[in-house]
Image (cartoon, helix red, strand yellow):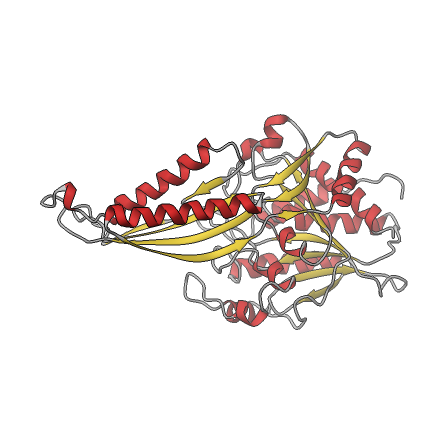
Amino acid sequence: MSKASINSQRLLDRLRALGEIGRLADGRLTRLAGSDADKAGRDAFVSWLQGAGLEVAIDRIGNVFGIWKLPENAGERPLLLGSHIDTVIDAGIYDGCYGVLAALEVIETLKEARYAPARPIAVAAFTNEEGVRYAPDMMGSLVHAGGLGADEALATVGTDGTILGAELARIGYAGQEEPGFLKPHAYIELHIEQGPVLDRESVPIGAVENLQGISWQRVTIDGHANHAGTTPMSMRRDAGYAAARVIAFLRDRARTSNTPTVATVGCISFEPNAINVIPSRATFTVDLRDPDEQRLLEEEDALADHLKELAGAEDVTISVERLARFQPVTFDRGIVELIEKAARGRGLAAKRMTSGAGHDAQMIARIAPAAMIFVPSVDGISHNPREHTSGTDLVAGANILLDVVAQLAAN
């Protein structure tokens, strides 16, 4: 196929339109999985799929697929593209949505160019990638890849007490297809970087070669509540102080390391949570990430050792619950090289990268060759209404996806 380009206006208009679905009265964008806003976003996406003449299929976990196949290629495994359209609370408009809508745009561009692929091409919008309302995150793609049973996922109880399966049925997206029905030949996900590297280095394209392993744990520290004024410091069993020591330990260890390990405590709560009472309980989450599995194991072991030592030193009881654990992913070398080649063909610089965030691609990589394309996020901001990528970069990334898809679908 001769060099073509996507319809930039169509892509940008759809991004803006989807970005208005789920706006609250205060202007914040929130489109959580299984919500009424999620239904409205899905409805818009399905209408665009139908308008493009694609076959629409929905599986039991609510993953939505738009499939382009020809009579002569219908028996081949499809090239799968996509991402997600659910959001965090008070979100930007690009995270996930860009990858889904750019994939649709690529298929439409190829159809309009009368390109005849040797295999079907499909776009997926995976359910509950963000994991805000229901855990774990990347749920739809995990179920599709066979890493979590559909029935177990559908029985998940949300932060608001709802059940995912019931909510999908309520909004009309409890599909009939069995998850995994579509077995991909390969998978490519286009995404904003959600980090500062490409923007800081003025590089328009990231060829993502691997993705960090993720360890999520919930730590509960039990001490003894007592009067804040009458209890001497030496006689306290202060769960709040013990939690602070863990937070400082994690930050200091990561900052002084010469590795790319990162550590975050993102949620914390005290009981009884009163200004004049020593906390009897502290509960907090720990997020550890590293692109190397052995290093990630070492960080988990270091945390476990620290907690054991801390329990004795502060006379507290500590328990740990595993919330999620994903090994690092190495993406397909051949597809990464195709991304770099496509960038050169468009006169664009490309940088090989590690993804610091989790993505649906890491789940689909379990069952098919996969890779990701990144475009810059201004100032590295994401999961925030200030999330922004320039139209020029959005179009450039979509054109790289177009070129890679045309190459991969040719045989």
Q: Position of residue 403 (x, y in %)?
A: 80, 42
Quadrant in which the N terminus appears: top right
Q: Position of residue 235 (x, y in %)?
A: 15, 46
Q: Locate residue 285 relative to residue 353 in the image: left or right.
A: left
Question: Which residue shows up at 58% across the image and 69% down it?
Answer: 149
Vertically, is 93 above or below 376? below
Q: Locate residue 114 relative to residue 377 in the image: left or right.
A: right
Of all residues shown, which one is farthest toward the left?
A: 230
Vertically, is 303 above or below 199? below
Q: Position of residue 2 (x, y in %)?
A: 89, 40
Task: Please give the count of numbered marks on the rendered protein.
Answer: 0
To which quarter of the image does residue 125 belong? bottom right
Q: Locate residue 129 relative to residue 158 in the image: left or right.
A: right
Q: Locate residue 308 relative to residue 190 in the image: left or right.
A: left
To which quarter of the image does residue 322 belong? bottom left
107 and 79: which one is in front? 79
Residue 108 seen: yes
Q: Position of residue 298 (x, y in %)?
A: 49, 45
To which quarter of the image does residue 193 belong? top right
Of all residues shown, which one is farthest toward the top?
A: 201
206 and 259: which one is in front? 259
Question: Which residue shows up at 74% across the image and 48% down it?
Answer: 105
Residue 170 seen: no
Question: Which residue shows up at 62% across the image and 26% down it?
Answer: 201
Vertically, is 145 above or below 82? below
